Amino acid sequence: RSTLFPYTTLFRSIARIMELTHPDDDMIVDGTKGLVIIDPDQETSQTYERAIKEGALAKNPPVQIDRQPTVTANGIEVAVMANAWSQEDVAHAIRNGADGIGLFRTEPFFMASKHLPTPQEFTEFLARCLEPVGTLRVNVRLLDVGADKNPIYLPLPPEPDPFMGLRGVRVLLRYPDLLEAQLRALLESSRRFNLGILIPMVTLDSDVVQVVDTCRKLAATMGVHKIPQIGAMIETPAAALTIRSLVEHVDFFSIGSNDLTQYTLAAGRENASVTDYFIDDHPAVLRLMEIAIKDAGSTPVSLCGELAGKTKAIPELLRIGLRSLSVASSLLAEVRQTIRGSR
Ligand code: PEP
Ligand code: MG
C-alpha cells in the first residue's frame, strides 16, 4: 500500500493521515514536493534512501526555469503565481518560474515574534524575503490572526466561537497600532518592490474602507506618492455576494477558497470530525466564486486557496472565468502543465 498524499491543506491532511495510518506504519514526508507517502513500497523507499544519501533532496536542484506564458490549448493566458511566507519560499517560487507572489502570508513572521514587530523590523524582513522577485508583483497580506492564531503580544479576548469572531481585518481595526505598523512597512517597501496589499477576512465594505483610508493618510505623512494597489480577500459568502460594492473601494480581489469553503459549508477547516463536509470544489463554493468573478466586472480576481493547486479542478476554474491562480511553489510546474492542456 503506497499512498501519495499532498499535505497542502495541512490540518485536514493530518486528520486524514491519522485515519489512514497505523502506529507502526512507515512514512516518507517529502517536503520538496509537498507529499506524504504512507507505507511506501520497497522501490519508493530505495529511491528516497538513495536521494537522501546523494543529498539530492536537500539541494533541491533548480528545475529548468519555464518563462513561457501559461496559455490554454484554446489560447487563453493564465497568470500562475505562488503562495509564500519566507525567504526560501520566495526564492523557490521564482526559481520555478512563478509569474509573481499572489499571496505572501505574514502570520509566521508575526507569530514568531515576542513583541509587536516595529515597522522597521517588518520592512527588513520583507526586504530579505522579496530580494529575488525583481519587478514581479507581490501581494503581501496584512496579518490574519484571531481564531486559532493569537500572537502573545495581542490581548485578544477568549471567544466561544473563534472562527466566527475577531479574525483578520476585524482584529486589525480593533488594534490600530497593529494595522499602522504593517502599513508603514508596506508603504516603505513599496518604494522598492511592486507590492499589492491584501486585506484578510473581509465581510463588510467598511472593513476595506477603513484600511484604505488609513493607508492613504499614512502615505501622505510618509511622502509616498504611489500607493500600492489594495485588494480584498474573498473568503466569506458575504464578500463574494457583495463584490459589486467592494469594487468601489479596492483594486483587485483574491479568493481564499479555504475559508470560503468553511464558511459556505459550515465545516471548520481544522475540525477533523467534519472533514467530509469540507469540500472546496463543492458546487456551492464554485457558484459563489463564479458570481463574484462576474460581478467584479473588470476588477481582477485571482484564486489563492488550495483549490487553485488541484489540477482536476482547473478546467472548472477556467470555465467560471478565473485567469489568475496562486499556488504552493511545489505545484507550479504541474498546474501550468494542466492549464496548457486545458481548454
Ligand atoms: C484561504 O482562506 O483560502 C487563504 C488563502 O487564506 P488562509 O489559508 O491563509 O486562511
Ligand atoms: Mg483564509
Image: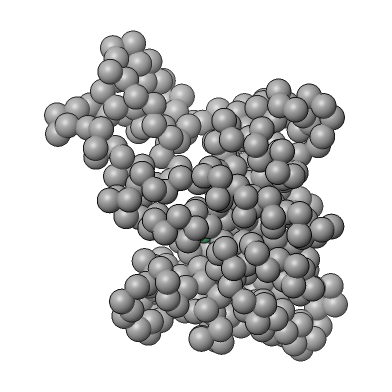
For the point 38% across and 58% down, the residue is 268
The quadrant where residue 61 appears: top right
Residue 10, x across and y down, in percent: 39, 47
Can residue 103 be seen here? Answer: no
Residue at the location (65% across, 64% down)?
241
Which residue is rendered at x = 76% and y = 59% of the image? 295
Q: Is residue 270 left or right of residue 311?
A: left
Instruction: Tell me residue 334's x, y (percent).
Output: 60, 28
Residue furthest top as drawn: 43
Query: Residue at position x 81%, y 83% from top?
Result: 223
- Between 299 and 281, the one nearer to me in the picture: 281
Residue 141, picture quadrant: bottom right
Rendered image coloring scheme: one colour
Q: From the viewer's perspective, is 40 left or right of 75?
A: left
Figure quadrant of the N terminus? top left
Of the 4 image quadrants, the one containing the C terminus is top right
Does residue 43 show up? yes
Q: Is residue 89 above or below residue 227?
A: above
Number of numbered callouts drawn = 0
User: x%, y% of residue 210?
Assistant: 66, 84
Q: Where's residue 169, x and y in %? A: 55, 75
- Residue 249 versus residue 311 in the image, above or below: below
Q: Is residue 270 left or right of residue 220?
A: left
